[in-house]
Amino acid sequence: MDLFNRLQGIFFNPKVTLKAISEKPIWIDALIILLIAFAFFSYITAPYLQSSDKLQESWTL
């Protein structure tokens, strides 16, 4: 079962998908998805964090 089928199966046929995952767990796919999600989240939130730091610096002046 490839990555796309597992992702789709979690929502549409979870019993069969989770059984297949328990028989042969592949953790590298989950790691790659988490790393991509973390990079995307960091890219989206970084400008807001930088503006927050600038606001705090200007407040102390």
Image: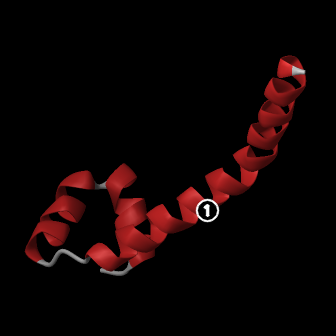
The quadrant of the picture occupied by the C terminus is top right
The residue lying toward the viewer, choosing from 6 and 40, is: 40
Name which residue lies at 11% across and 67% down.
22
The residue lying toward the viewer, choosing from 46 and 34, is: 46
Asked which quadrant contains residue 39, the reply is: bottom right
Q: Label 1, on which residue?
A: 39
Q: Position of residue 26 (x, y in %)?
A: 25, 77
Q: Position of residue 11 (x, y in %)?
A: 38, 50
Asked which quadrant contains residue 27, the reply is: bottom left
Question: What SS does tag 1 mark?
Answer: helix
Q: Is residue 1 in view?
A: yes
Asked which quadrant contains residue 55, the reply is: top right
Q: Position of residue 28 (x, y in %)?
A: 34, 78
Q: Is residue 17 left or right of residue 50?
A: left
29, above or below 15, in the image: below
| Residue type (three-letter) at the residue carrying disc 1 | Ala
Name which residue lies at 63% across and 51% down.
41
